[in-house]
Image (cartoon, rainbow, N blue to C red):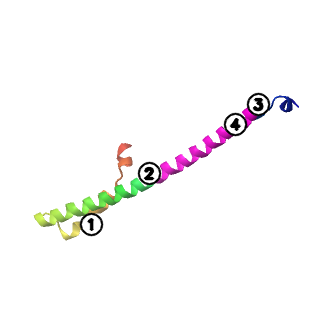
Amino acid sequence: MSFVRHPATLFGVLNLSAIAGSTYYLRSHLVYNVQESEARSDEIEGTLRGHIGLIEESLDRLEGKGMEADRGKKMDDYYGKRAKDEKKK
């Protein structure tokens, strides 16, 4: 019954366990938020790349370089790429 004699030890252990538990919870919450943010960024990046492809195709058609068979090709090429895939090379 050393805790009865030394209640400060009990409070110290409870304090450390509360700090460890809250740290673990905050870390898991932070990891989840980072993953969600990365997924949103990838989606936005793909959308922007697809729009860039559409704009380039429109410019090619206006300049007379684009053919009907090439329609949608640049958009698919750009949309299929990802910056994180390019970094691996």
Q: Which portion, as a residue range, is magenta? A: 11-38
* Residue at mark 4 to residue at mark 3: CA–CA distance: 10 Å
**Amino acid type for the residue under numbered disc 4:** Asn
Q: Which residue is mark 3?
A: 8
Residue 25 screen position, x and y as percent: 61, 46
Which is closer to the viewer, label 2 or label 1? 2
CB under 8 Å between callouts 4 and 3?
no
Q: Secondary structure at mark 1?
A: loop
**Amino acid type for the residue under numbered disc 1:** Gly
Q: Which mark is residue 38?
A: 2
Q: Secondary structure at mark 3?
A: helix
Mark sitting earlier along the chain (3/1) = 3
* Residue at mark 2 to residue at mark 4: CA–CA distance: 35 Å
Residue that protrudes farthest toward the bottom in the picture: 68
* Residue at mark 3 to residue at mark 1: CA–CA distance: 71 Å
Q: Is residue 28 magenta?
A: yes
Mark sitting earlier along the chain (2/1) = 2
